[in-house]
Image (cartoon, rainbow, N blue to C red):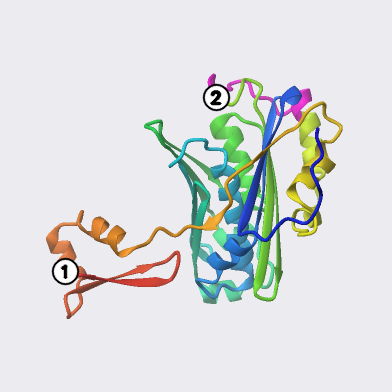
Amino acid sequence: MTQTSPATDETYSGRTLGFTIPSRDSRGRIVRLDRALDEILSAHEYPAPITHLLAEALVLATLMGSLLKDDGSQVTMQAQTEAGAVNLLVCDYRGGELRGYVDFDEARLSELGANPSLFALFGKGYLAITFDVAKGRGRYQGIVPLEGETLAEACETYFYQSEQVPTLIRTAVRSEGDNCLAAGMLVQHLPDGEEGRERLHARLDHPEWEHVAILGGSVKYDELVDPELSLEAIIWRLFHEEDEVRIERMATVEKGCRCSVEHYVDVLSKFPEADRQEMRDENGIIVVDCAFCSRKFPIEA
């Protein structure tokens, strides 16, 4: 592996690296979100547990979304909850554009303390992960129970159960005052190649995968969110003894809410006139409130 400079990352909104380990039939992604994360979180005054939850979800959406190669492809992650303090969590990633939002019951959340468990937040919840693949390649979705300690564990379960791909995911979130930094790494075993045959015989105990999973799993929480440690340096620390590790610089991550007057005019045009009439206020205006960026858009009749 060719070592790159471990110098501090440049100022960024969010940065993603792809990497492959050919001799182990493995690939990975590593991401760190900085300014883009602060911009997304600043749209609402989230309490600390919700900030941490959404930050982790945005990292996961970026890791999974960056696996899609075709321009215009999108991954959407949505939590469906039953009897939890969180009513809705949704985020999506498309070509470096990231957005997310959490709706929650503030009174119920306040009863849970400073560090509520995943079950306390979601109750009997489910995580739906949807891949919309561009160029007419279709749309597919997997739904898994929100079990375990973190959202990352639920995503690992999704890849193994729905795609038969052994997957390791690690995430970290660090908040200091009004600033939040979040990062994560995803590593997968693809013995049949990245595309093509169904992986019906994926094995968590495959020796090549066990080796990579042990190395990848050794990444430290503090390493992921250390701005003085570049993403390249983290990969070097973990996998420098491998024969070859190929690194690919991927899209810079930016806040990507796609709301606009034109967009909502197009959406509303698909509703029957009777429905649009009910939406109008006394001045004939339909006010659309974008939950992602907390902006209101007055749409004239």
Decide if residue 90 is on the left or right side of residue 219: left
Q: Taking the image as drawn, is residue 78 in sight?
A: no
Q: Which residue corresponds to mark 2?
A: 195
Q: Secondary structure at mark 2?
A: loop
Q: Amino acid at mark 1?
A: Ala
Q: Earlier in the sequence, mark 1 or mark 2?
A: 2
Q: Secondary structure at mark 1?
A: loop
Q: Which residue corresponds to mark 1?
A: 301
Q: Amino acid at mark 2?
A: Glu
Q: Residue furthest bottom?
A: 282
Query: What stretch of residues is rendered in magenta?
Result: 196-209
x, y percentage for residue 288? 31, 68
Decide if residue 161 is on the left or right side of residue 136: right
Q: Is residue 104 magenta?
A: no
Q: Residue furthest right?
A: 241
Residue at 64% across, 24% down: 202
Residue 153 versus residue 99: which sits nearer the camera?
Answer: 99
Image quadrant assignment for residue 197: top right
Residue at 54% across, 21% down: 198
Image vertical order of residue 171 relative to residue 121, above or below: above
Residue at 67% across, 61% down: 11
Quadrant that contains the C terminus = bottom left
Label 1 and label 2: CA atoms lie apart by 48 Å
Q: Taking the image as drawn, is residue 108 in sight?
A: yes
Image vertical order of residue 271 relative to residue 75, above or below: below
Q: Is residue 198 magenta?
A: yes
Image quadrant assignment for residue 242: top right
Secondary structure mainly formed by the magenta segment: loop
Residue at 57% across, 42% down: 66
